[in-house]
Amino acid sequence: MASLFSAQLYPGRALGFLVLGASLHDILTRLKAEPQRFPKLDLVYSPTDPVKEPVIVTLPANGVRLRFDGPEQRLRLVEVIDFTKNHITFKDQSTDRDLVKPPADPSAHPHSGEPASEPTFKHIYQRFLGPTYDGEYIPGSDGQGIYMLSYPGVAFTFPLAQSAYSPDKDVVTLLSSSTQVATSMAVFSGDSWAQSRETLWTEVLPSIKSFAPLAKGKDVCPDEISLVKIHGGGKLQLFKKWTSNSTWISLGDTTPQELVAELGPPDAIYRKNDQRMYIHKIRTASNSRTRPDSDGLRRQGDLTDTDHSSANTMSEDSNDDEAIEEEFAGNVSGECFYNYFYLGFDVLVSTPTTPSQPPPSQDKTGLPEKNIKSESPDRMVATKLILHANVPGSYPFNRHRRCRWEIAYLDQTSPETPINTETPFADISNHLRQEWQSIYSSEDEALQKQRGMVLNRGWGDSPGSSCELLGGWEDSGDSTHAGVGARRADGSEDSTTTLYGFPGLVFEVLKNGYVSNLTVF
């Protein structure tokens, strides 16, 4: 049996460590770290629209339900739906008040319906929080309704028959009966539940770093990255959450020291020499009667190097089998991935490679200039950035926090609606084809280079090294639903995705049409 969940109520901000504005990744990581306290987690999301519809996490053993918005995956609402499975307190100056008096024996929870198991209106209104304004009555379809007793940042739900309600009666008259007990409690951001309901999913929440109890703790919260703008040509602008500050990463130029100075040390460093795409590089070089297209070689390598555990890079000068074999002779260059799980992305650090070409419509105004640095071929720089969308239902779900991105150079083709993390890939592809159509000699060439490659992340010796192909370029077609319906080892999730490449970009697309991660090179 789970230990009783005890938490202090902070109206408008938090219930214990469940702070409004915290990310889904952070909350799930914390809950999973305490399996004895939180033995069961139920995750509910929309399979067809997981990045726009809310994500719900229910803790049945603790009587708590958490609601996150889809686009940002931030905690918007904390609900207590069973008061017998938790102990809620409120501290007023130096006095701690119990919402419900816990049983003397913590292992003997009272049954629902017992007098002390649920908070009464009288206790809430007189002792726990004090008086408040009249609430809101919401009628039901069966003659029963609910009365919302609302305080700033917290509200309680009371069942009330429609026949017993009258707008002329005040809240005390309506709910003063000793049998009136609350059935649920909600913690939200706002002055009242009636006002906050309209902006619950879109309101800009205050920084979790400004939450005093959290700030006093030992854990230091680093600055979050709220948005990554992709400008093309290896230029990325990273905006920091809750500030007006931003920083730039120039692929092929930004050093590991600069990464650490701007983003802090990585959560982990991963080194791996993955040779499973060797056959595709050999095929390209062997079948080419002339010098192979360097962009084509890089694209095929980058197309599969979409996981933080794959540290293989492609040489732009490889023009025959010998050059390819030399490249795979061994990973002695020290290249590695900087894993920023908390920020939602990974950075490949390797010897310099030329960034992808800038988009035809790029306006260089405001873009950073190339720094004058050592041109030593052995120096290490950032050469790729892998942005993770943390889509519920995807194979790598909750490995990284959700990182939102926007393709800034497509603003001209889509001035009203930004092309970003929430855009279906079919729309992204249409805009990118329009942007890059001038670099292809024909429509057939464009379609040839934009074909999908199916992979299965569920095959392999570990979740971090699973990158297996299902068929080749010719078998995939253009549909994001191509490929075998492979599932994870436990049979719970589909682990098949499709990779699509454009100059400087590789999209890993789920079967529902949304992007699971984006590699920028």
Image (cartoon, rainbow, N blue to C red):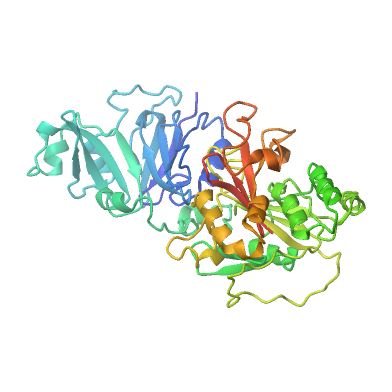
Q: Which of the two residues, 287 or 117, is positioned nearer the viewer here?
A: 287
* Drawn side of residue 263 relative to residue 90, left or right: right
Q: Quadrant of residue 476?
A: top right
* Drawn side of residue 481 relative to residue 63, left or right: right
Q: Which of the two residues, 454 or 37, is positioned nearer the viewer here?
A: 454
Residue 68: tell me if it is visible.
Answer: yes
Q: Position of residue 264 (x, y in %)?
A: 66, 60
* Drawn side of residue 212 relative to residue 163, left or right: right
Is 293 situated above or below 452?
Answer: below
Q: Position of residue 471 (x, y in %)?
A: 70, 36
Q: Position of residue 208 (x, y in %)?
A: 48, 55
Q: Quadrant of residue 472?
A: top right
Q: Which of the two residues, 100 or 104, is positioned nearer the viewer here?
A: 100
Q: Position of residue 408 (x, y in %)?
A: 54, 65
Is 64 situated above or below 340?
Answer: above
Identify the residue at image location x=73%, y=60%: 383
Identify the residue at image location x=21%, y=49%: 132
